[in-house]
């Protein structure tokens, strides 16, 4: 059996897009979201089968992701199955689109100002 590493203590993100970005700023959580996007509803045992992160650490990371609204769980018997919840990520994407538009407008103004000079 291979030794498992302990993850750093995850912190709870704030609500909204900032919370989504904070939650996804951790490599382990980003990997968990990627797995859940592809695999549908998955148990913690399945999530830890191909990683060296402990079940306890994965559980903590899943709770951080759930606090950010990125994942949710359903209880099936005694087991919790975790699945991706795309709504908060869609909101974060809209925020990034707005920021991109603002930058495009600012760069357009700068370009016009430089061309006038």
Image: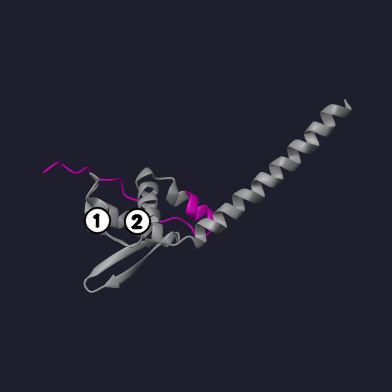
Q: Quadrant of residue 4?
A: top left
- Asked whether residue 11 appears in the rendered view, the answer is no
Residue visible at 33% across and 54% down? 61
Disc 1 crowd rating (10 Å Cα; few below 14, some 14-19, many 20+) is few
Instruction: Using the image, determine if residue 10 lies above or below residue 74.
Output: above
Query: Which is more N-terminal, label 1 or label 2?
Result: 2
Instruction: Using the image, determine if residue 7 lies above or below residue 110.
Output: below
Q: Residue furthest top?
A: 117
Are circles 2 and 1 on residues that touch, CB within 8 Å?
yes
Residue visible at 36% across and 47% down? 31
Q: Position of residue 102 (x, y in %)?
A: 71, 45
Disc 2 crowd rating (10 Å Cα; few below 14, some 14-19, many 20+) is few
Assign the N terminus to one quadrant of the image.
top left
- Asked whether residue 83 appears in the rendered view, the answer is yes
Q: Residue furthest right?
A: 116
Q: Residue furthest left?
A: 1
Residue 42 lies in the magenta stretch? no
* Apparent side of residue 40 relative to residue 86 in the rendered image (left or right): left
Residue 14 lies in the magenta stretch? yes
In three-dimensional space, the C-alpha distance between marks 2 and 1, rounded to whole angstroms, equals 10 Å
For the residue labelled by badge 1, is the local secondary structure a helix, a strand or a loop? helix
What range of the chain is rendered magenta? 1-21
Q: Quadrant of residue 117?
A: top right
Question: Circle 2 is placed at which residue position?
Answer: 39
Question: Circle 1 is placed at which residue position?
Answer: 46
């Amino acid at each position: 059996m291979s030794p498992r590493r302990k993850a750093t203590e995850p912190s709870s993100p704030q609500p909204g897009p900032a919370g989504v970005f904070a939650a996804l700023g951790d490599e382990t959580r980003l990997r968990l979201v990627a797995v859940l996007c592809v695999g549908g509803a998955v148990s913690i045992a399945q999530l830890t089968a191909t990683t060296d992160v402990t079940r306890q650490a994965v559980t903590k990371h899943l709770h951080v992701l759930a606090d950010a609204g990125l994942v949710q769980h359903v209880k099936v018997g005694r087991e919790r199955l975790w699945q991706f919840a795309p709504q908060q990520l869609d909101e974060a994407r809209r925020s990034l689109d707005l920021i991109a538009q603002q930058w495009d407008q600012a760069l357009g103004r700068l370009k016009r100002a430089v061309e006038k000079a």
